[in-house]
Image (tube, helix red, strand yellow):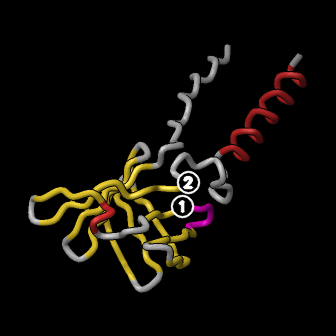
Amino acid sequence: MKKILACLLAVLLLALALGCSSGDDKNDPNLGVYTAKTAEYSGITLNVDQFFEKGFTIELKSGGKCKLIADGESANGKWTLDGTKFHVEGGGIECDGTLENGVMSIDYDGVVFNLINEAYAAPAAQAPAPALR
């Protein structure tokens, strides 16, 4: 009986270690395409098409990579997230902002762009581990 419990515990610990690996972020719920909807400047909110006729998107990819597309022009970049503090750079721009629950706000030269990931799905809550007796 002790050998079975020891084997089960070892398998459980291995599964937890693999599941918590920081190298695999493909299941990151923040990945995906964020489309700019509005832009705010000096207290005025405008539709983003008044800044970018063909739109503005940021696609967050695994490994901290991203693709920025503004008015049909694309550039590759990098992104980081620390809590809800978001940073992106690429294509000659560098912006800070926030990212939470599929909603991104970034400040570029005093204009705050609000982007939404329509496909965002919040991660499922994990059930608590059963108590061992």
- Amino acid, disc 2: Leu
66 lies left or right of 101? right
Residue beneath label 1, please?
Answer: 60
Badge 1 marks a residue whose secondary structure is strand
Q: Is residue 123 above or below residue 100?
A: above
Q: Residue at x 12, y 59 (%)?
A: 44
Name the quadrant containing residue 32: bottom right
Where does the C terminus fall, quadrant-wise? top right
Name the quadrant containing residue 50: bottom left
Q: Residue at x 47, y 80 (%)?
A: 90
Q: Position of residue 29 (x, y in %)?
A: 55, 46
Q: Position of residue 11 (x, y in %)?
A: 81, 34
**Foreground pick, 52 / 92:** 52
Badge 2 marks a residue whose secondary structure is loop
Separation of disc 2 and disc 1 at Cα? 5 Å
Where does the N terminus fall, quadrant-wise? top right
**Foreground pick, 39 / 71:** 71
Q: Position of residue 63 (x, y in %)?
A: 61, 66
- Amino acid, disc 1: Leu
Asked if the magenta segment contains residue 130, the reply would be no
Query: Which of the two discs, 2 and 1, labels the residue nearer the N terminus?
Result: 2
**Residues at circles 2 and 1 in contact by the CB criterion of under 8 Å:** yes
Residue beneath label 2, please?
Answer: 31
Q: Residue at x 44, y 72 (%)?
A: 70
State the extent of the magenta-drawn residues as a range: 60-64
